[in-house]
Image (cartoon, rainbow, N blue to C red):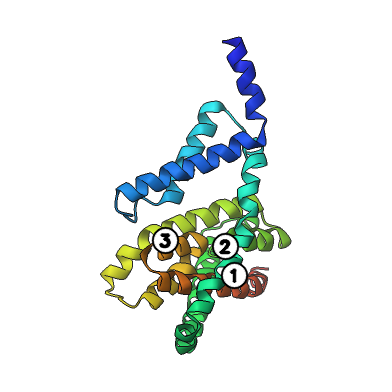
């Protein structure tokens, strides 16, 4: 037993182990999601988080140790975001026809997401540091963490809030759009990317390439606009 424990101690300090755990968790989660017919509740990101978190809890592994391996996946968020420009280029004619409605939806969606988060948190007496961390929750993690850190928030807390927002949005977007009888994939995708950033965009691509394209557009534009508006909105709290 002591020999096995020694081997585990050695492996647990190896970044490759936690990279493998991360990838394995997602592959298992994706198989589960596929087995359910891609049901919104069986979101692979949510399942992967639960699986990876369970491994960390059972092994008593600190997050800092885990992130030494998981950071390689985190690095790929940037290139993956840039790749979203490819379907945007392929569907550029469709995008241009819907440009004005998209800009209107962007302004309203960004304003509601930012205003509701800051307003409700202020009314509930949430400390300013937490409000700063909460305010960019609806944009992709790389941008949200950067905005939070620059304004004095906690990037780690921001990352958690971003993932909660993304997973919740990805689960709710399809049944909500069906309930509202929204059939236009452009509108469905844009809503998913605007409210649930990368996780919502991934969900949109599972439904339709057109929906995924518009989700990617919404994610990028919302990140840009939110980065500008967050400092202005927080200025009113002083």
Q: CA separation, marks 1 and 3?
A: 18 Å
Q: Which residue is labeled 2 in the image? A: 140
- Residue 63: quadrant of the picture: top right
**Disc nearer the start of the sequence (3/2):** 2
Per the image, label 2 sits on a secondary structure element best described as: loop
Quadrant in the picture for the C terminus: bottom right
**Disc nearer the start of the sequence (2/1):** 2
Which mark, residue 223? 1
Looking at the image, residue 169 sits to the left or right of residue 178; the answer is right
Looking at the image, residue 188 sits to the left or right of residue 52; the answer is left
Which mark, residue 203? 3
- Whether the residues at callouts 2 and 1 have beta carbons within 8 Å, the answer is yes
Q: Position of residue 235 (x, y in %)?
A: 67, 71
Which is more foreground, mark 3 or mark 2? 3
Per the image, label 3 sits on a secondary structure element best described as: helix
Which mark, residue 62? none
Q: Position of residue 15 (x, y in %)?
A: 66, 36
- Whether the residues at callouts 1 and 3 have beta carbons within 8 Å, the answer is no
């Amino acid at each position: 037993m002591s020999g096995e424990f020694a081997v585990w101690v050695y492996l647990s300090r190896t970044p490759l182990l936690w990279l493998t755990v991360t990838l394995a968790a997602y592959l298992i989660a994706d198989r589960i999601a596929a087995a359910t017919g891609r049901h919104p509740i069986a979101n692979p990101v949510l399942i992967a988080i639960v699986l990876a978190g369970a491994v960390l809890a059972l092994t008593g592994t600190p997050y800092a140790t885990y992130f030494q391996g998981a950071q390689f996946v985190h690095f790929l968020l940037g290139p993956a975001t840039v790749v979203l420009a490819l379907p945007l280029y392929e569907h550029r004619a469709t995008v241009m026809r819907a440009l004005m409605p998209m800009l209107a939806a962007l302004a309203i969606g960004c304003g509601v997401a930012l205003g509701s988060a800051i307003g409700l948190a202020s009314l509930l007496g949430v400390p300013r540091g937490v409000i700063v961390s909460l305010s960019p929750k609806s944009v992709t993690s790389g941008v949200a963490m950067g905005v939070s850190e620059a304004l004095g928030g906690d990037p780690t807390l921001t990352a958690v809030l971003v993932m909660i927002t993304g997973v919740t949005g990805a689960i709710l977007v399809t049944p909500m759009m069906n309930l509202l009888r929204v059939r236009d994939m452009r509108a469905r995708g844009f809503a998913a990317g605007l409210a649930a950033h990368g996780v919502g965009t991934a969900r949109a691509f599972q439904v339709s390439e057109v929906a995924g394209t518009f989700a990617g557009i919404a994610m990028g534009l919302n990140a840009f606009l939110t980065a500008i508006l967050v400092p202005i909105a927080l200025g009113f709290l002083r």
